[in-house]
Image: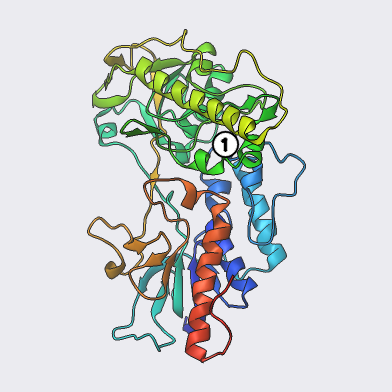
Amino acid sequence: MGCEYAETVVIGAGQQGCGAAAALQELGRESIVLERGEIGQAWAHERWDSLLVGSGNRSVRFPGWDYDGDDPDGYMSGPELAGHLRRYAERRNLPIRQHTPVEKVECPPGATAHDDVRFRTHLAAGGVIESRNLVAALGGYASPRVPDLASEVDPSVDQLHSRYYRNPGALPDGAVLVVGAGISGQQIADELVAAGREVFLSVGRHRSWPRHYRGRSVVEWLFALSLYEDFVTPDADGDRTLPGLPVTAAPDGGRELNLGALAGRGVVLVGSARAAKHGVLLLEDNVVAIAAESARSFRRAIDTIDARIRQRGFAVPEQRPAPEVDLTRITDFGNELDLARHGITTIIWCTGFGPDYRILPDSALDDRGFPIQQEGIFGALPGLYYAGLPDGRSQAPVAISANVENGRSIARQVHIDHLLRSGSPASVALP
């Protein structure tokens, strides 16, 4: 295969890559989007079957298109989100090449601000696409994270990351240990116990918000009361920060999902996993402390909703008693979990993901392999941009709806670059 040219190459056709391509299209700038699998690959094929998108249906929006389904306050599944993304890409006629993985990106030596070619994107199947601009829309969820202690677990126990879990029927018989109490861990533990499996949940720090409050879903309150930033930005509790999106979405929209609710449904809560000695998992004895911290984040969310309602003078019925995380069923477990004695045959690691930017030039990355960036958008190389780059302080840049602002911010820079290079008299002060 030979060499071709595009003004901008976008790597990744998830929500961030499609958002960037659509925003470029809005300004009349051409691009090519390269996707290793299918549009919405991770949502459609790399999550469990019943996953619900924790930020709710209202957050599913792209440049020039807002959610238009019949359940704006609900939670769609991963495949449903992928379907929305594919329909959007088709409607906008986005220039996406599916099943086109990238092998590496390199920069021609000596490229200057005046050159058309500042990047060469090498395709795994052969061929090169040269471009002036490159948008890395690889996101923060490319590489599953499993703690080192997993290698010390008895090999008779099946282990898998949540990326590879699909449904209860796909697991061996026996009890299941789920490690991690964020959205993935709690949704999977809830599904397993509902299917009649004996379930242990190794807790970790997380946030919980109410599913419903004062006659409305929490998704409605997020948008009606401008609370979305609170939702995607971790709470501060002294000098500690609770990471991740709050847990809210349960398959049955009428019930809550939190540690108290899971304990009430029969899930056995155990402490945070710290080490393993073959058939024994060594734990921190912190179940009550973790649950109490999560309950405080739940209470803060309710207090914030109440305060906003008062500030705006809305006439909303009181809810008494207010929902809370039921701590009465929660007790500390101890420092050890004997896997064989409790019949645990499977461990599901719901321990998150990390970014993987190794296809980029070394000069774009720091000594840990993380992108060198400014403002979460600009790369270390001229013409290199990031869409959906985690910043370590907030989930906002990787949130689904962030693709709109991320994409338009990048498109403005690409368009300004075009105007300046072409000597156009048009204003570069774009809205």
Amino acid at pointer 1: Leu
Is 85 situated above or below 231?
below
Tell me the crowding category of disc 1: few under 14, some 14 to 19, or many 20 or more residues within 10 angstroms, Cα based: many
Q: Nearer the viewer, residue 63 or 184?
A: 63
Q: Quadrant of the C terminus?
A: bottom right
Is 408 situated above or below 301?
below
**Rendered location of residue 186, percent (x, y):** 49, 27
Its colouring scheme is rainbow
**Left or right: 238, with 249 as reference point:** left
**Left or right: 206, with 152 as reference point:** right
Quadrant hosting residue 302: top right
Is 189 situated above or below 102?
above
For the point 31% across and 69% down, the residue is: 361
Quadrant hosting residue 56: top right
For the point 66% across and 18% down, the residue is: 319
Q: Which residue is mark 1?
A: 51
**Rendered location of residue 159, percent (x, y):** 37, 32
Residue 150 visible from this viewpoint: yes
For the point 46% across and 80% down, the residue is: 131
For the point 53% across and 11% down, the residue is: 264
